[in-house]
Image: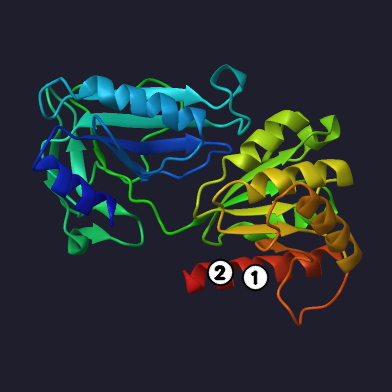
Amino acid sequence: MSWAGFARAALAAEPVALVTVLATEGSAPRGPGARMVVTAGCQHGTIGGGALEHQAAAQARAILGLPPGSWRVQDYPLGPLLGQCCGGRVRLLVERLAEVIEEPAIITLGGTIQRIRLPGEGRDPASEVSQLDPGVRRGAISARGPLPVSGNSFAEPTETDAMPLFLFGAGHVGQAIAARAQGLPLHLAWFDTRPEAAETPGVVLANEDEMVACAGEAPADAAVVILTHDHGLDYRLTEAALGSPAHFVGLIGSQTKRARFVSRLDKAGIDAGRLTCPIGLAGIDGKEPEVIAIATLAQLLTLRQAA
């Protein structure tokens, strides 16, 4: 069921809160427009991130006792204070829902939130500027700087169907994958433990435990690709990712590496049936990092298409 369908059904019976990702910066588990519906007793949908989601759900339940249309905008740095290793920033809108609008809308913050439907034909697709109000631009909300305040209006973000990609390892293959992921429908969160990886734009430095925790929190629609410099860390990440609901768990390596990992996983009582190793679309051969990257990205795009 879509978030809107769940929210509409729940709203007929009880107060409902909606958490929307307004903006992100750096590595974040979900992109702008991701939504999570929260009631007193349950949640539907995900904004990702484990501890982030727990905090956001608590904020949402706190707002259930306020009048419909009440709202808060909250920033979350995804670092150690939140128990996250993503390293980015997320700006959230938490609101007590008054109504459910699925179409693109202009949000105006006031005493209560007001939404004005924005028909698709009213938007110039090239510039993403509303023809109804040239001053309102999708994506105008930033993850940094002053919070939106009463009187501000902005186009409500709409999440694309980008697949969250958790990429562990910033070696030659990791760099090739990240470089070629630009422009593809993938939302990249990229991690490495080595200090020298900090020189590579887009990489989040994290210790091994933080990376393992992040792999274990991968959401159901995510792909996890593991290609670090350390086989021991690769195993820990693989074990954690297989314990998550991630849609895809991929590990770089040979059939021999796969056999060794599967044997260890079996002894640990972990089902390795979801493990893809070697990674890459069948029929695309080659050991060059660029070839592996293209084969892996093609494999991920086929999974997205199948979904």
Crowding at dot 2, Cα within 10 Å, few <14 / some 14-19 / many 20+, comes out as some
Instruction: Name the one closer to the observer, 302 or 270.
Output: 270
Q: Tell me: 218 left or right of 260.
A: left
Instruction: Name the one closer to the observer, 13 or 143.
Output: 13
Q: Position of residue 50 (x, y in %)?
A: 51, 33
Q: Position of residue 266 (x, y in %)?
A: 77, 54
Q: Position of residue 53 (x, y in %)?
A: 43, 32
Q: Which residue is under mark 2? A: 303
Q: Amino acid at mark 1?
A: Gln
Callout 1 secondary element: helix
Callout 2 secondary element: helix
Q: Which residue is under mark 1? A: 299
The label shown at residue 244 is none
* As drawn, 274 above or below 31: below
* As drawn, 289 above or below 69: below
Instruction: Name the one closer to the observer, 298 or 238.
Output: 238
Disc 2 to disc 1: CB gap under 8 Å? yes
Q: Amino acid at mark 2?
A: Leu
Q: Identify the residue shown where x is 69% and y is 54%.
A: 225
